[in-house]
C-alpha cells in the first residue's frame, strides 16, 4: 500500500512535511523537581525529573567527582499499544531507549555544574503511536527546564521516513510498520548542533542529506511550538510573584 | 452520601492579564549579550569558541549587577548560603555526624561537635556520646538548624548550637519552592493567631503550637519532647495556616510573616477544609495581594 495518496496526503491527512499536533504541559507533578507531559498526535508521554540529588545507595559506583551522572528509566504502560502486553521494566527495548535518551542528555545538560550528584529522568509512555524516542526526548527537555537544570540549549527530536523520494516527518505507528527506513535525530536548535541520530533500515547514500534536512526542519518546528508554549507559561508564573516584580 | 462539588468555569490566565514589568526572560540557549565585557554568573555559559557570546543555560529572569550577569531559574533546588535557617530530615546516622536531607543538591552534614548536648555548652564529646547519637537524633527525625558554612562542592554544614534550633517534635511540615521564602532577619515567628512558624530558607515550613510554658524566648533546643495531645482549637489553627500557605504557594506569592497573617485573616470567613477549593484559594490570594499592596503604598518595596 502507498504511504502517500495521489493527492499528496498521508494516511492521517497530513502533508509530508507536517507535524502532528503538539500539546504540552509543564509542572504536572508536585512531588518531582520537574515534570512535563507531551502529546504528539496520539503519542503521549509523561516525564518526571528528580535531582540533582545525592546518589542513591545502589548507584554509588556511578558517582563522578567532577560531574553528575544521569539515570534514565523508560517504561511503557501496559495499555499503551494495540496489543495489551505486560512489559517488564528491564526489557531490551526499554533498556535501549533509556541508554539512548541518557546519551542524548549527557550531551546537553551541563553536568560539570553538579559534581557528585545524580539526575533521574523517568519516562512513562501512556499511548504509543510512533516516534516514541522523539516524544520522550521532547518531554524530558521540558521537564529538565521545569526543574531548573542547566542545559546548553533545548533538545528537540523528530523522526522522518522516506517513500518515493519524498520525506515524511514525524511518522506515526502505521508509517513505522510500513517498513521504510526510519531516521530520528535530536538537535539543539539554537546552537544548530545534532547531538543524536539513529537510522533503522537502509537508504541510499544520496538520500541521507534530504532526510537530515527534513528531520532538522521538523525539530525546528517542534522547537517553535515548545518555545512559544514555554514563554507563555513563564510569564504567568512570573507575573503573580511579587518577589520577581521588584527584582 | 458524599457531596459533589462542581467547579465554576475559570478564565484562562493569559499573558496580558498581569503586567510583567521590566523583567527579562530567557530560556536555555538564548544569547543574553554579545558584548565581551560582561562576567558570566550563575545560569549562564559561553561556548569558548571564537564567538564570545553569553548564553543562558536555564529558563528564568536575567539579573545584572554591574558587570555580572546571572540568570535565576524560576524553580530549582535549594542552594544554601551562610546564615540560612533550614529544616531537614535525618537520613543517616554516621560516625560522629548525621546526614540531613534539606532539599539541596547534596545531603547536608551535621557534626556531632556542632550540636548542643545536654549538660553545658563546653562539654567534650566522648565515645559514649558517639554511641548515643541515635538516642538524640534518629533516622526520620526533623530538625531545624543554621548554615554556618558551605563547603567547596556545595555540601552544607549545619549547626544547632543554639536553643532556637534542634529537634522538632509536634507540628506540621509544608514543603514549598525555596524561591518563595523571603529572606528576612528573622525566620522563626510567633504568629499572633496562636501558632509559631519556622520559615526555613530551603522551602520547608514547620508550623507548631507556641510554647507558653518555656521561660526563655529562645526555645528548648529540642530536648523537651512533649507528646501530650494538642487541643483541637490549636490543631485547627495549624491546619488553617497550612492551607493558607499552600494557597499562597500555589499562586506563587512570597511567604513571610505578614503575607501569611494576611492570608490567615482573609481565610477566617471559610472553614478550614474549604480552603482547598480553587475558587476560595483564588479569593484568599487576591485579598492577600490587595492587603499587601495597601500596606506597601508609599513603600517602594512592592
Image (tube, grey):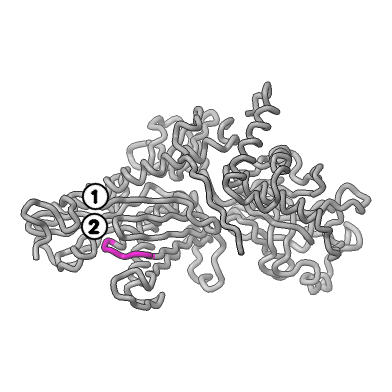
**Against A174, is B278 above or below?**
above
- Name the residue rendered at 66%, 42% in the picture: B255
At which x and y percent is residue A244? 56, 35
Comes first in the chain, label 2 or label 1: 2
At which x and y percent is residue A14? 18, 52
Q: Is residue B143 left or right of residue A20?
A: right
Q: Is residue B114 left or right of residue B101?
A: right
The one nearer the camera, B87 or A78, is A78
Q: Chain of mark 2?
A: A
Whether A246 is among the magenta residues is no
Residue B264: assigned label: none
- Crowding around mark 1 (Cα neighbors within 10 Å: few <14, some 14 to 19, many 20+) is many
Q: CA distance from mark 2 to mark 1?
A: 8 Å
At which x and y percent is residue A107? 37, 56
The magenta stretch spans which residues?
Answer: A125-131
Q: Chain of mark 1?
A: A
- Name the residue rendered at 52%, 41% in the picture: B72
Quadrant the N terminus of chain B occupies: bottom right
Asked if disc 2 and disc 1 are in contact, CB closer than 8 Å, the reply is: yes
Quadrant the C terminus of chain B occupies: top right
Residue A159: assigned label: 2
The one nearer the camera, B300 or B71, is B300
Residue bearing the label numbered 1: A218
For the residue labelled by badge 2, is the local secondary structure a helix, a strand or a loop? strand
Amino acid at each position: 500500500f502507498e504511504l502517500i495518496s495521489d493527492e499528496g496526503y498521508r494516511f492521517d491527512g497530513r502533508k509530508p512535511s507536517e507535524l502532528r499536533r503538539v500539546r504540552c504541559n509543564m509542572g504536572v507533578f508536585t512531588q518531582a523537581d520537574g515534570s512535563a507531559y507531551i502529546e504528539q498526535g496520539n503519542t503521549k508521554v509523561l516525564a518526571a525529573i528528580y535531582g540533582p540529588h545525592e546518589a542513591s545507595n545502589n548507584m554509588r559506583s556511578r558517582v563522578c567527582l567532577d560531574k553528575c551522572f544521569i539515570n534514565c528509566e523508560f517504561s511503557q504502560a501496559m495499555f499503551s499499544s494495540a496489543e495489551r502486553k505486560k512489559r517488564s521494566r528491564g526489557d531490551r527495548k526499554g533498556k535501549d531507549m533509556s541508554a539512548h535518551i541518557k546519551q542524548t542528555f549527557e550531551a546537553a545538560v551541563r553536568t560539570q555544574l553538579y559534581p557528585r550528584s545524580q539526575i533521574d529522568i523517568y519516562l512513562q509512555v501512556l499511548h504509543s503511536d510512533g516516534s516514541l524516542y522523539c516524544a520522550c526526548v521532547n518531554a524530558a527537555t521540558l521537564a529538565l527546564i521545569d526543574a531548573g537544570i542547566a542545559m546548553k540549549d533545548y533538545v528537540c527530536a523528530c523522526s522522518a521516513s522516506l517513500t518515493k523520494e519524498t520525506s515524511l516527518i514525524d511518522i506515526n505507528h502505521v508509517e513505522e510498520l510500513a517498513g521504510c527506513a526510519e531516521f530520528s535525530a535530536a538537535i539543539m536548535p539554537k546552537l544548530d548542533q545534532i547531538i543524536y541520530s539513529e537510522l533503522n533500515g537502509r537508504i541510499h547514500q544520496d538520500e541521507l542529506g534530504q532526510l537530515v534536512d527534513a528531520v532538522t526542519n521538523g525539530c525546528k518546528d517542534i522547537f517553535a511550538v515548545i518555545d512559544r508554549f514555554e514563554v507563555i507559561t513563564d510569564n504567568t508564573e512570573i507575573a503573580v510573584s511579587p518577589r520577581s516584580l521588584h527584582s | 452520601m458524599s457531596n459533589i462539588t462542581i467547579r465554576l468555569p475559570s478564565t484562562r490566565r493569559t499573558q496580558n492579564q498581569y503586567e510583567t514589568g521590566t523583567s527579562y526572560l530567557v530560556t536555555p540557549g538564548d544569547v543574553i549579550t554579545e558584548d565581551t565585557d560582561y562576567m558570566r554568573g550563575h545560569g549562564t555559559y559561553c561556548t569558548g569558541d571564537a564567538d564570545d557570546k553569553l548564553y543562558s543555560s536555564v529558563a528564568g529572569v536575567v539579573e545584572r549587577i554591574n558587570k555580572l550577569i546571572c540568570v535565576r531559574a524560576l524553580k530549582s533546588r535549594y542552594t544554601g548560603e551562610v546564615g540560612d535557617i533550614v529544616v531537614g530530615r535525618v537520613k543517616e546516622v554516621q560516625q560522629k555526624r548525621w546526614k540531613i536531607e534539606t532539599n539541596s543538591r547534596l545531603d547536608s552534614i551535621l557534626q556531632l561537635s556542632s550540636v548542643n548536648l545536654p549538660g553545658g555548652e563546653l562539654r567534650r564529646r566522648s565515645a559514649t556520646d558517639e554511641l548515643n547519637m541515635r538516642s538524640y537524633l534518629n533516622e526520620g527525625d526533623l530538625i531545624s538548624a543554621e548554615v554556618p558554612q558551605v563547603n567547596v562542592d556545595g555540601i552544607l554544614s549545619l549547626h544547632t548550637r543554639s536553643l532556637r534550633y534542634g529537634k522538632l517534635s509536634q507540628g506540621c511540615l509544608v514543603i514549598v519552592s525555596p524561591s518563595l521564602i523571603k529572606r528576612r532577619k528573622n525566620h522563626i515567628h510567633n504568629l499572633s493567631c496562636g501558632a509559631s512558624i519556622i520559615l526555613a530558607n530551603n522551602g520547608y515550613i514547620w508550623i507548631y503550637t507556641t510554647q507558653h510554658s518555656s521561660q526563655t524566648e529562645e526555645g528548648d533546643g529540642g530536648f523537651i519532647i512533649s507528646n501530650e495531645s494538642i487541643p483541637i482549637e490549636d490543631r485547627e489553627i495549624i491546619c488553617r495556616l497550612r492551607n493558607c500557605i499552600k494557597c499562597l504557594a500555589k499562586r506563587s506569592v512570597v511567604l513571610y510573616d505578614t503575607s501569611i497573617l494576611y492570608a490567615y485573616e482573609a481565610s477566617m470567613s471559610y472553614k478550614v477544609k474549604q480552603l482547598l477549593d480553587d475558587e476560595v484559594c483564588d479569593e484568599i490570594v487576591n485579598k492577600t495581594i490587595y492587603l499587601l499592596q495597601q500596606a506597601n503604598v508609599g513603600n517602594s518595596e512592592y
